[in-house]
Image (cartoon, coloured by chain):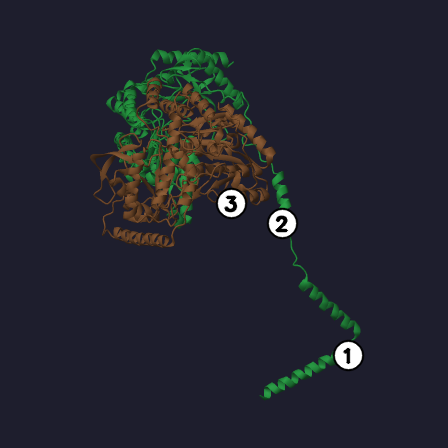
Amino acid sequence: MFADDIVICGEGREQVEENLERWRFALERRGMKVSRDMTEYMCVNEREAVYNKPFVESFEETPLLVAVLTYMGYGILTLFGYLRDFLRDWNFEKCHVAKERDEQKDFVPLYQDFENFYTRNLYMRIRDNWNRPICSVPGARMDVMERVTHDYNWTFKHTGTVLFDVINMGSYNYLGFAENSGLCANAAVEAAMKYGLGVCGTRHEIGNLDKHEELEKLVARFLGVESSMVFGMGFATNSMNIPTLAGKGCLILSDELNHASLVLGARLSGSTIRVFKHNNMQSLEKLLRDAIVHGQPRTHRPWKKILILVEGIYSMEGSIVRLPEVIALKKKYKAYLYLDEAHSIGALGPGGRGVVDYFGLDPCDVDIMMGTFTKSFGAAGGYIGGNKELIDYLRTHSHSAIYATSMSPPVAQQIITSMKCIMGEDGTTLGQERLCQLSKNTTYFRRRLQEMGFIIYGNNDSPVVPLMLYMPAKIGAFGREMLKRNIGTVVVGFPATPIIESRARFCVSAAHTKEMLDTALNAISEVGDLLQLKYSRHAWPSDEETNHFSYLDSHQD
Amino acid sequence: MIQTTKMASGQQWVLVEMVQAFYEAPAYHLILEGILILWIIRLLFSKTYKLQERSDLTEKEKEELIEEWQPEPLVPAVSNDHPSLNYDVVTGPPSHKITVNGKECINFASFNFLGLLDNERVKQKALASLKKYGVGTCGPRGFYGTFDVHLELEERLAKFMKTEEAIIYSYGFATIASAIPAYSKRGDIVFVDEAACFSIQKGLQASRSFIKYFKHNDMEDLERLLKEQELEDQKNPRKARVTRRFIVVEGLYMNTSDICPLPELVKLKYKYKVRIFLEESMSFGVLGEHGRGVTEHFGVSIDDIDLISANMENAVASIGGFCCGRSFVIDHQRLSGQGYCFSASLPPMLASAAIEALNIMEEDPEIFTILREKCKHAHKALQDIPGLKVVGEAFAPALHLQLEHSTGSRESDVRTLRSIIDYCLDRQIALTQARYLDKEERFLPPPSIRVVVTVEQTEEEIEKATSCIREAALARLE
């Protein structure tokens, strides 16, 4: 089906042949036909050349002046914070923070004084940009409930007014499956009618419904792996399963920007954790070499196993993992690879099968394929896919299988229906159209932002688009100005990002129409001028440079 | 001036004398000195003496090491007949009547205490929600994942429990596991009951605090530990001033089905200034006149408990969990509860289902009395089964049946219990074993059959189930 897009890579002709065979096998297992044109070889030794398509990822340097001003901004905020705290201490200023009960005043304080300094003095100023309640489907447009505050964001009151049809650039609704009507919703309704909402048991204790088994078989087929297991929460999929895979005497190599759930899982496992620079293969290779050569600290015993933790798309950077290189390294050093496709599954690749599909690799090269259903599938929960031994082991040893309630049946149904739609098994091309639309939207949105002169981070193909704001005051201003223009965006600052790299983040969706994107882009441009956010010093795009995008244009129409 | 010339002339004299002595010295003396000088020079220029050989490896040696290293397999092989590999498959809803492996049974295994899983009102409310909001939330609470129903549910839970604030999580297991590390950090001390469930254990591990286990429900043992700590504190008062302490207990223990002595715990709390975290997954919607849990059961003021956490997956028959307490405590989790901040929020239809369940619980508190009566009935009926003993309080809805005499090996105990369960399954009584991760549990409870009592079971059905278990025990426990 998509075999034309695939370029087989490898070192030397033999390896290419071997990889080709493997591919053919993998594709046929997924029910795809292999065309005869799959003979385009790329025999390469250079690391750059292991990609079958341009891998364009940019992180434009922070302009020096901006950096200085940002630091000054934080300095001023901190000074005022101390001043305000001082005034609060002496009761010159009314303190809104909830207080300890009088009966427990002589207990050891529950929070250290400085612990909430940041929350009290910085976050509180712009708190209205987060937790905005909505009262509709989180689709391409959503209804946001209006809130007002009379005490500088300490408390909010709902006015009762609803801001209708706000363009939603914040939800992770990549394929637009967050819907309250249509195939998926109808199927979910049926499942809820038949099974009820809860399960009231774990997988091992009479909570293993036929729906779960059906879902697991489908997920395995979708991913092109032998077997899979599903869990009720994406976060817990990581934090409860990594400890079953690694333990004392094992080494975990983790990307510095990995999600909190991966970090927690790694910590709970009791393994040694070393962190490599974000998506930096030299850093990873150095850690791998050193680890194997030197063994465990002090005893110098060899490591039991080495597990590499990476994500498909990094949700704050919009970058895509350099998977071909990671796989090459993993094979060379006999490490195991844990790939978290929370954001990339459904959102990348010609068949929507995530980053493995995007690079045209064999899913069998990734030992542990993890992902979530929250984003592209518009449901909830997570999965792990891999070979049968792995999944059997998880079934018997996963914390989640034994102690956590299994997935709600209508949620499972939503995943089944949306996944079948992506796979084209519903008999329509709707899923394929969504995938194309997402890729088109992504390219268009990213290119327009670049042309406008914003600094945006990440990979050209990533639907997660971070736009750099840098200064703390602009975080709040951007979020508010956009909402005024009826566009809901996500803004993030420290501690989710490095201190000076505050940003706004847009998640492009297949549900966005070109008109919606244009409206959003115009608003962004307007706000960008107002707040002077067009920091980029790159010239976009002169005529020669557009050639660089010619492959993108072919996607355009 | 005079002095310097004197000194100079003196030096001259010494020099002359030395030259003279050199001429006069015997040859062997000169040779000896010569050798000594050469020795010193050699010492000066020789390599410094080292205890160890230098460990710099050549590139080739490194390559060899890398080549030689063989990792362990990612996972050890699991034999195909592992008892947990072959789950029982449930077709249709796990409600009062349940179809296990194709057989229709009466459900004595799902934690559907109040029978709300299949409740028509709950379903209708959830469906209405589904038709309005869709299934997923596509984002965490912070990023447009807060729905009006979430706010409503939090408000309702707070009102139901008569606390200032409540916070909901999208997964029951993650609730207490996230709440504990939000407060207790490295260096803090947590006193915890040995029978605490697995999610508490994981929360404690994530907190990296100093953990002290006391014997199950043994207040003397707890007080001994608290006293020990008091002595420790007197030695180092500066450290004591910043070391937070917590007691973590369960209301009704999942693993032992008995109740914590809350009034005594509260006394200890004020005596030793320790905060109490109470996990109520089994007791919320079960104990107390209005189903508020252990606090109501004992008549303890809820303000005396610092944090109550429970899941909405048992009595409420939805998905997710919540924490409630004073705003001073709870609000902190909105930025520090990992499972709250970094996870997608609860699907709105599940929140709506929980709201409707609360409505039913508030409208008809009679339901809790009925449940208690049924529990007592079942507890009584299960007594005196030969070879099996009942573990748990008479009013606990999930009891454990343990072997009176273990065969000595856990594996064969498990097999024996499984054969009893299979016997009952054949006779349309669905039961299950309490499952644990044998190697991960801090204090592994003995194997047991879990018997869950719900309001939907009739007295006849309970009679039928107990007589069935009795028959099975007679048949299988020879």
At 25% from the left and 40% from the top, the residue drawn is A485
Tell me if A161 is positioned left or right of A507 in this view.
Answer: left
Residue A200 in view here: no
The residue marked by circle 2 belongs to what chain?
B
Which of the 4 image quarters holds residue A136?
Answer: top left
Above or below residue A481? Residue A82 is below
Residue A84 in view here: yes
Tell me if B47 is positioned left or right of B352 in this view.
Answer: right
The residue under label 3 is: A283
The residues bearing labels 1 and 3 have C-alpha atoms spaced at a distance of 72 Å
SS at mark 1 in the image: helix
Residue B181 at what x, y percent from top left?
39, 39
Residue B476 at what x, y percent from top left?
50, 13
Q: Residue furthest bottom?
A: B2
Q: Residue furthest front?
A: A543
SS at mark 3 in the image: helix
